[in-house]
Image (cartoon, rainbow, N blue to C red):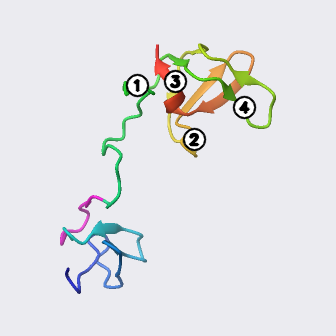
Amino acid sequence: MPTETNCPKCRSENIYVDGHLWICPECGHEWTTAAPSAEAGSSAQIVGEDRPTDSTIRDAFGTPLATGDSVTVIKELKIKGSSSVVKVGTKVKNIKLGDGGDGHDIACRIDGLGSIHLKSEFVKKA
């Protein structure tokens, strides 16, 4: 394990080790001790990250989704702060993908409910 290095992102000397990670408190960059990169701007894999590295949003069955797709709800979803529910089999047209926070990565409009955000793990591509 190296004892001294600079942050590969901002080149700061103020770095520290936390378990198997090097951490830069100035820019927040984290990288593994197995492969500390000496080049600025390179991205090392974060230890413990078990998701795919691509940023595509996928439905409950692993099918990639795109903005404008239609999806079907596969689980009854209660809406926070309301007594309304989104029933199983509800078809949602013209979705918009993005990060709404808390994993709600689909923005859509459902007749009778209005604009809401859904988690992609509760829908399937129609």
Quarter residue 55 falls in = top left
Q: Which of the pair 75/59 is nearer the observer?
A: 75
Secondary structure of the residue carrying tag 1 is loop
- Mark drawn on residue 79: 4
Secondary structure mainly formed by the magenta segment: loop
Cα distance in 3D space between marks 4 and 2: 15 Å
Residue 42 picture location, percent across and down = 23, 61
Instruction: Report the residue marked by disc 2.
Output: 100
Q: Quadrant of the N terminus?
A: bottom left
Tell which circle, 1 or 2, labels the residue nearer the N-terminal end.
Answer: 1
Spatial separation of the CA atoms under disc 2 and disc 3: 16 Å
Q: Amino acid at mark 3?
A: Val
Mark 4, Cα crowd under 10 Å, few <14 / some 14-19 / many 20+, is some
The residues colored magenta run: 37-45
Q: Is residue 5 magenta?
A: no
Q: Which residue is mark 3?
A: 123
Q: Residue at x 58, y 30 (%)?
A: 107
Q: Which residue is tagged 1? A: 61
User: Are the two marked residues, 4 and 1, in contact with CB atoms closer than 8 angstroms?
Assistant: no
Which circle's residue, 2 or 3, is located before the other in the chain? 2
- Give the image location of residue 40, x and y in percent: 23, 68
- Tell me how far mark 1 sits from mark 2, CA to CA: 21 Å
Identified at 54% across, 42% down, the residue is 103
Q: Is residue 2 above or below residue 98?
A: below
Q: Earlier in the sequence, mark 4 or mark 1?
A: 1
